[in-house]
Every structure is written in C-alpha cells, then in structure tokens.
Image (tube, grey):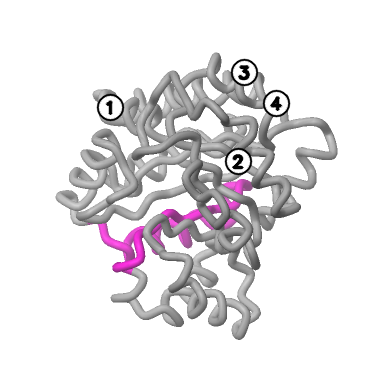
C-alpha cells in the first residue's frame, strides 16, 4: 500500500496516522526485524526506518548512540535494504526510509532509487538534502515513474520557504515540532498551531508532526493539529535499555498499542 492510501483510509474514518521510527541494526538487524514485525502487528500505519550514518546532523544523542551501535554491528545501507526486501509480504505498513544524503550519493542516485523500489520502500526522508539540490533526485523519480514519495521536512524556521519546500512533494509533509535536533521534549514551538496552518495553506498533503513526541499524553495534546504523529527517540531508548529481544518486542508492542488507541483504533 502506498503512503497516500494509508492517510486516505485513516482520514476518511476520523483516525490519525501512527508513524514509529527506529534505527536499523540497533543493536543488530535481528532485533530490528523483530521490532518492525511487532510494531506492524500492534497497529503502526507507516514504519520509518533509519539508515545509520556517522554524522547525523538532525539527530539528538539518543539516535546518535543508536547509529553508533548499528555501525559497530556492521550495518550499512545494503544490509538495511536487504532487510526491507526480506519483509515484503510480512508487514502491511508501508516503509519510509530515513537516510542521509551522503550514502545515497555514494550508492548512486539512480541505483539507489531502483534498489529502494525493488526492496519495497515507499517513501524517502533525507534530512540533509538542501532544497536547492533536490531537483536531481525528483527528476530521477519522475523519469523512472518510480512509486517512491520524497517526503519534505518543514521546520518552524522555514518561514517563507515552506511553499517551495513542499512544492512537488508526495506522501506527506514531515513537520518538525520545534527548533533543534531529535529527542523527547515537553515543550514545542509556541506558535505550533500557526506553523501547521502555514503548511496547510501551502499544500493539500497530509501533515505528520515529529521531533520530541515521547508519550501518549503529548500525542493527546497535539493530535488535533495534524494528520499523523511520528515517534522515534522514545522507541530507540526502549531498545537501548532492553536486555533481550523479547523485552524489545514486549515494550514496543505495548507502547504502539497505547498510541493506536489514542489515535483511533485500527
């Protein structure tokens, strides 16, 4: 199922999208596979999977540590895509791959897009891809008629650039809740409602809010503003603290089920 189909089905029934994030290969790919299956079964609508990278400028310390553990375990972009491909037909949620641009460039843009499509990736989130350099990637997607959504990130500091950032985008808009890097926080941008309104004025795409959302109470407080929520650091922390793979599955499943209830049962 494509990402836009997920949002259409949810919004038509008054529900919000639940988009959990974890880092691939943290602490190894076997745990990632188990966690992905658990999240899918517990009610995740879209699964965001991070490709570990040595210089994750958009991420806070929790995800930085996860990237380091994954890299030390030998995880690379090839192994991540192999894992995604191996899970085709075993999960119902579409994939959004979060990947920094350098690994994409090293892979080769055309080769990377072709490999993602073959593996079953449906969306790409590239946090360090400048607006001015996005053209080649978009052109390649269009030329190949590739069913991959290039999902834009919009920050409270985007201001007058919002309309340019979302132009030509597909899937959904990833709205960043506040200034700074990823990590659980209790306070978001003071003008969050106005910020979301600016995005809605610039696009008809669904909006999912991420960066800093870490519990059911926060989700309950902000869900009326957006079409979906993205949770990452809290899940990565659970995986970091778990002693066994079974503990990862239990904790992640329980958390996703609680969030799914808050956002509307599937």
> Circle 2: is it few (<14), some (14-19), or many (20+) Cα within 10 Å?
many
Q: Is residue 136 magenta?
A: no
Task: Please tell me whether residue 184 is drawn above or below residue 118 in the rendered image.
Answer: above
Judged from this view, the residue extending furthest toward the bottom is 143
Q: CA distance from mark 2 to mark 1?
A: 31 Å
Which residue does the image show at 50% across and 22% down from the upper left?
A: 255
Give the quarter of the figure containing the N terminus. bottom right
Which residue has dot 2 on it? Answer: 208
Mark 1 against mark 4, which lies toward the viewer? 4
- Using the rendered view, name the quadrant where residue 233 is placed: top left
For mark 2, give the secondary structure.
strand
Vertical side of 29 occupied by 266: above or below: above
Disc on res. 220: 3
Disc 1 secondary structure class: loop
Give the SS element for disc 3.
helix
- Residue that carries the numbered disc 4 in the rendered image: 224
Mark 4 secondary-structure assignment: helix
From the image, state whether disc 2 or disc 1 is nearer to you. 2
Q: What is the CA distance from the residue labelled 2 to the residue labelled 4? A: 11 Å
Which of marks 4 and 2 precedes in the sequence?
2
Residue 84 covered by magenta stretch: yes
* Mark 2 vs 1: CB contact within 8 A: no
Q: Counting other residues with Cα less than 10 Å from the Cα at mark 3, is it few (<14), some (14-19), or many (20 or more)? A: few
Asked if the residue under mark 3 is in contact with the one under mark 1, i.e. CB atoms within 8 Å, the reply is: no
Q: Is residue 119 above or below residue 87?
A: below
Tell me which segment is drawn in magenta. 75-103
Mark nearer the N terminus (2 vs 1): 2
Q: Position of residue 167 (x, y in %)?
A: 64, 64
The disc, 1 or 3, on the residue closer to the chain's N-terminal end is 3
Q: Are marks 3 and 4 in contact (CB under 8 Å)?
A: no
User: Which residue is denoted by mark 1 in the rendering?
Assistant: 244
């Amino acid at each position: 199922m494509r990402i836009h189909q997920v949002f259409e089905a949810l919004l038509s029934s008054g529900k919000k999208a639940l988009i959990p994030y974890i880092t691939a290969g943290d602490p190894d790919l076997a745990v990632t596979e188990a966690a992905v299956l658990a999240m899918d079964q517990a009610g995740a609508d879209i699964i965001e999977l991070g490709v570990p990278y040595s210089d994750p400028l958009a991420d806070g310390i929790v995800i930085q540590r996860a990237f380091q553990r994954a890299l030390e375990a030998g995880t690379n972009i090839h192994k991540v895509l192999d894992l995604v491909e191996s899970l085709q037909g075993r999960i119902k949620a579409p994939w959004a791959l979060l990947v920094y641009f350098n690994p994409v460039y090293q892979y080769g843009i055309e080769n990377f897009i072709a490999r993602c499509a073959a593996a079953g990736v449906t969306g790409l989130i590239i946090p360090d891809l400048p607006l001015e350099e996005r053209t080649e990637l978009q052109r390649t997607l269009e030329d190949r008629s590739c069913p991959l959504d290039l999902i834009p990130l919009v920050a409270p500091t985007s201001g007058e650039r919002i309309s340019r950032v979302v132009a030509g985008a597909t899937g959904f808009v990833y709205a960043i809740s506040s200034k700074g890097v990823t990590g659980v926080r209790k306070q978001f941008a003071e003008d969050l409602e106005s910020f979301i309104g600016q995005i809605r004025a610039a696009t008809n795409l669904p909006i999912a809010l991420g960066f800093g959302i870490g519990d059911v109470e926060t989700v309950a407080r902000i869900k009326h503003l957006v079409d979906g929520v993205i949770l990452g650091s809290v899940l990565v922390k659970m995986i970091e603290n778990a002693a066994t793979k079974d503990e990862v599955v239990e904790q992640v499943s329980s958390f996703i089920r609680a969030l799914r209830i808050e956002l509307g049962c599937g």
